[in-house]
Image (tube, grey):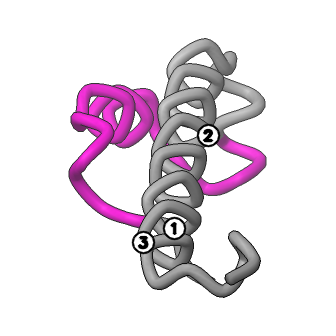
Amino acid sequence: MPIRDAWYMRIVTDGLRTALDRYALMGERARLRDMGDEQLADIGLTRRDALNEARRSFWQGCRCR
């Protein structure tokens, strides 16, 4: 049986995809935290909004698809 047909490959790929997505989300939140006030105003956020989002743990929330 080829490895791509193995039942566990779906579990492994879904888990890896989720882990990579959460890692990217952490990076986005860090960049949001480091933005200046003018940049935040451009996207309609306050400093408080940005810091609240940046403080969230990686497992909280998910990206819109």
* Amino acid type, callout 2: Ala
Queried whether the magenta region covers residue 44, the answer comes back as: yes
Give the residues drawn in magenta, as a range.
41-62
Q: Nearer the viewer, residue 8 or 45?
A: 8
Quadrant for the C terminus, please: bottom right
Residue on which disc 3 sits:
11
Q: Residue at x 24, y 37 (%)?
A: 56
**Image coords of residue 42 (percent x, y):** 77, 47
Is residue 4 toward the left or the right of residue 11 in the image?
A: right
Q: Nearer the viewer, residue 8 or 37?
A: 8
* Amino acid type, callout 3: Ile
Residue on which disc 1 sits:
63
**Image coords of residue 14 (percent x, y):** 50, 69
* Amino acid type, callout 1: Arg
Queried whether the magenta region covers residue 59, the answer comes back as: yes
Q: Residues within 10 Å of mark 3 (few under 14, many from 20)?
A: few
Q: Single out the mark in the foreground, 2 or 3.
A: 3
Q: Residue at x 42, y 72 (%)?
A: 11
Q: Nearer the viewer, residue 51 or 10?
A: 10
Residue on which disc 2 sits:
24
- Lower sequence index among marks 2 and 1: 2
- Lower sequence index among marks 1 and 3: 3
Can you say whether 34 is above or below 15 in the image?
Answer: above
**Residue 8 disc label:** none
Can you say whether 16 is above or below 1 in the image?
Answer: above
Q: CA distance from mark 2 to mark 3?
A: 20 Å
Q: Residues within 10 Å of mark 2 (few under 14, many from 20)?
A: some
Can you say whether 65 is above or below 22 in the image?
Answer: below
Q: Dots 2 and 1: beta carbons under 8 Å?
A: yes
Q: CA distance from mark 2 to mark 1?
A: 10 Å
Q: Residue at x 46, y 39 (%)?
A: 46
Can you say whether 6 is above or below 39 in the image?
Answer: below
